[in-house]
Image (cartoon, rainbow, N blue to C red):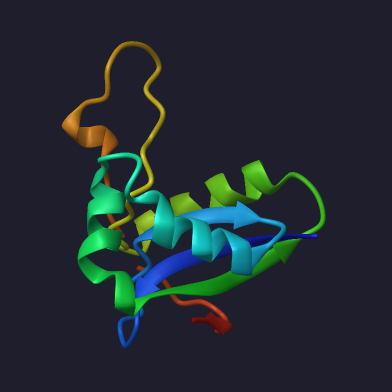
Amino acid sequence: MYYLYGLHLEGDEEIRYVGSTNNPQFRLWAHLNEYKRRDTPKNSWIQANRAAVRMKILQTVENDPCSAEKWMITGLRKAGHRLFNVRRPRAGALTKQDLVTAPCDVLGIELK
């Protein structure tokens, strides 16, 4: 089983990043510690808010977590969430439009 999750700040329902994993506790730990390795908008946000970053399980899926994740990202963006997830460019370098942000209405399993 795979878990689609969203990262958000404690007390704020806006989802800022969507991912999938088969081990939510480890993945949250990794997010909270990987910001040191790469300078990205998501990791800068995590570093600035490390004590308040929470993981919310959005959905569970049995198969094809990548397709489910893309579907969730699309839906959250349409709902106005400002996601740090990067849209994959067709060719060439990333543009400003590739970096988008967005929040969501989700079931709520909180991991601290």
> As displayed, is residue 94 above or below residue 111?
above
Relative to 15, is 93 on the left or the right? left
**What residue occupies the far top of the structure in this picture?**
92
Q: Can residue 76 be seen from the camera position used here?
A: no
Q: For the N terminus, which image quadrant?
A: bottom right
Residue 77 placement: quadrant: bottom left
> As displayed, is residue 63 above or below residue 91?
below
Q: Position of residue 32 (x, y in %)?
A: 41, 62
**What residue occupies the far bottom of the structure in this picture?**
11
Residue 105 placement: quadrant: bottom left
Residue 97 placement: quadrant: top left
Relative to 91, is 26 on the left or the right? right
Q: Position of residue 26 (x, y in %)?
A: 61, 62
Relative to 16, is 99 on the left or the right? left
Q: Position of residue 81 (x, y in %)?
A: 32, 63
Q: Residue at x 24, y 47 (%)?
A: 41
> As displayed, is residue 17 above or below residue 92?
below
Q: Can residue 14 be seen from the camera position used here?
A: yes
Q: Position of residue 104 (x, y in %)?
A: 41, 71
Q: Residue at x 25, y 70 (%)?
A: 49
Front one among 55 and 112: 112
Q: Residue at x 72, y 57 (%)?
A: 22
Q: Residue at x 64, y 50 (%)?
A: 68
How many badges with numbers are in the image?
Answer: 0
